[in-house]
Amino acid sequence: MQSLFYVRFFLRYLALSILLLTSFTASTLAAVPDSNVSKPRLPAVPHTKKTDSVITKKNYTTQQVVVTGTRNESLVQDSPVRVEVISNAQLQSTAMVNAADLLREQTGLLLTTNVRTGVQMMGLSPDYTMILIDGQPMVGRIAGVLELSRISVGNIDRVEIVKGPMSSLYGSDALAGVINIITKKPKDGWSGKVYSQYLHHGAAELQLEGGYGGNDIEATAFFNRKSAVPFELHQDSLVLPYAGFTDYTSQLKALWRISPSINISGNGRYFQSDSRGSFTESFFGQIASNSGSVHQKELSGTLASEWTHGKARLTAQLYGSKYTERYDFDTTQGSAGNTDDFDRQILKGYLQYDVFWNLRNRFTFGLEENLDNTFGSRYPDKPSYRTFSVFGQWEGNPTEWVSYSLSARYVDNSAYANPSFSGNGFDSTLLTALWLTHPKLALNFKLTDNLQFRTSIGTGYKVPDFRQLYIQFSNNLAGAGYNLLGARRLGLDLQPERSTAFDAGLTYNFTSESTENPLSGSIEVRGFRNNLSNLIEFYLAGQDPNTNVAVYSYHNLAHVYTQGIETNVRLAKQVDASKLLSLDLGYQYLDAKDVEVLNAIDKKEAVYISGEYLLRKNYGGLWLRSKHSGVVRFQLDDQEIGVKANIRLQYVGRFGDESLDKNGLAIGNPPRRVLDRDDEYVPGYTILNAAISKRFENVNILSASRIETTLGVNNILDTMNLKSIPSLLGRQFFVNLAIQW
């Protein structure tokens, strides 16, 4: 019966796509002047020669085409929504291995570690950041976090980051923002690449790429294998074992241009991970290990078609993904059971209709339906979600100096009935619809040729996920035992989370008039504020009366805010015709507080056993948030001899860890612990990385067009904190070799 339902789902969207193509397009185009004019295209980005300077390249970054901010093509400088881009050149120069390493070095993105390594954005936990690969969501959140280390960097063309609520365009999980990982397209003609890397701790990587780019057909193939042997880390009296693993990632992409107005594309991705050995678990500051194996598999695919006629475009997509995870642990270690399994399936139908009046004036209308099914030992109820969404967006450019986007989305979720308004004797249907559209307005003002002001205000939402509602899990490991129960299993009614966010920033781009040693760069200052209601937080609910094991669950915090300032300075200096120097500096100040705690302080309700009152100056805010963080990147590029060298630094300030709570001061209903002492913080830390690469052009080895080798050291300072941050593995040396055809 389930397979029949999926077939009907597919046929429904296929039929709807054809109907829209034949009727909706025709009727709309009839109302658009000059319907025979082809769809406006973005201006060509200037090409840089080998001898071009970094300054030229830096200036051209504003000419990059991005898609994540508005779900349509826009130039970075013209997009009303601020989009940060990590380019392929940056990826190559640093020789990073996985997405976790990549995102760690971006301003305002902090990695958090529990069961998985995830990314915190704007002071919001990884649950609220949507991770996309080629515009489609990743599947496999465990403990609310996607394991970013399973994403290989080798196949990434660029990464687009949008900070702030994007629920109007991307739905529930985009409360904090969106990270879109965009994979490579083929070069013209045939191309290929072999890449191999060896890292400290016995880790190795092999990567194969191939592709063909023609006028009518494009195709790429990617394969990656990563492996590591088991190892141990020692710090003081603590010894942590890490299991060996073997990961496989493969991807196929193809595009067929049937005609100038019609194309069909497909994308298939497969991931498999097998780990065996001793596993370290860090949970609420408790460290324990168990032996056994973990097996993960993810299979996803997208089938899409795009029709263009005159000034209109219709895009239809069907996406499916299946993620499975299975734990087989030794019962002698005290685990709750020998086997723990998890299975999640997602099926999505998507339609988007765009009308282009010109490059910067266009209307977008979309329909989206998601089916989300979960199975496994942790979810005996087999919870299922069904979500239907309608969204729209208007992008305008009334003058040469102003551009805007206005977007909204209406969502119907099967797990939560739409709220209703009653009383006062009036029809509430319209008010209900308006309240549920989650609008966002973004503005871009070009104050001068070099100075831009961007601002946005928007709302976001997130319904409780299956984990927060239904999970049923027990871990009896010695030293780290706990039970985790979904809120509904404890009779708690979690409310959907909502946010209102505002941000504003100035960007100044400059280029010196000197022709011999020009200096170019940009300075950006941005402030943001998020007001959240019903924020869902993890908390200690009590103890199991039978086993005295701690029981954790989820509850709503009535009012929370996160606010801060981000600054980025980018400089590029041409030393001579071939030598280029660049410097990137980034800093974030973050203030994240629970308003209910602040109110209790002001009302003299936060009282210690000694009778003293908690003062505002002693309240540290939300747990696991660093007030100060920053990144520094310095790079030398000598194109004449084909050498690149870089030094990168990341600083993360101290953050509160609830497991270090010393006095148990609790406020609110249900009560939560308060960060109020210096010894409840994990000390800040610094990570220093360096790499140097050498490029050989037009070599006669294996008929290759280019060979490049890189040597590097990650975490030069050997920073470690095994108890609080087990993902810091200490100093790592690496070497890699890439052969390109």
Image (cartoon, rainbow, N blue to C red):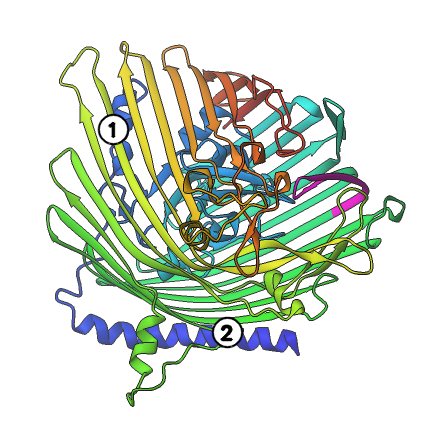
Instruction: Estimate the x, y position of residue 177 in percent, counting from the top left.
Output: 41, 50
Query: Looking at this rendering, what residue extends furthest in the right direction?
Result: 332
Q: Nearer the viewer, residue 254 or 614?
A: 614
Q: Quadrant of residue 578?
A: top left
Q: Which residue is mark 2?
A: 416
Residue at 79%, 60% (x, y): give it: 545
Left or right of 396? Residue 122 is: right
Residue closer to the observer: 136 or 45: 136
* Real-space CA distance between mark 1 and mark 2, rounded to the nearest whole angstrom: 46 Å
Up the image or down, 214 lies above or below 730; here it is below
Viewer-closest of 424 and 722:
424
Q: Earlier in the sequence, mark 1 or mark 2?
A: 2
Quarter of the image where the N terminus is located: bottom right
Residue with the most extreme bottom position: 425
Q: What's the magenta region?
A: 281-294
- Secondary structure at numbered mark 1: strand
Secondary structure, magenta segment, majority class: strand
Q: Position of residue 156 (x, y in %)?
A: 48, 38
**Label 1 sits on residue:** 522
> What amino acid type should be assigned to the residue bearing mark 1?
Ser
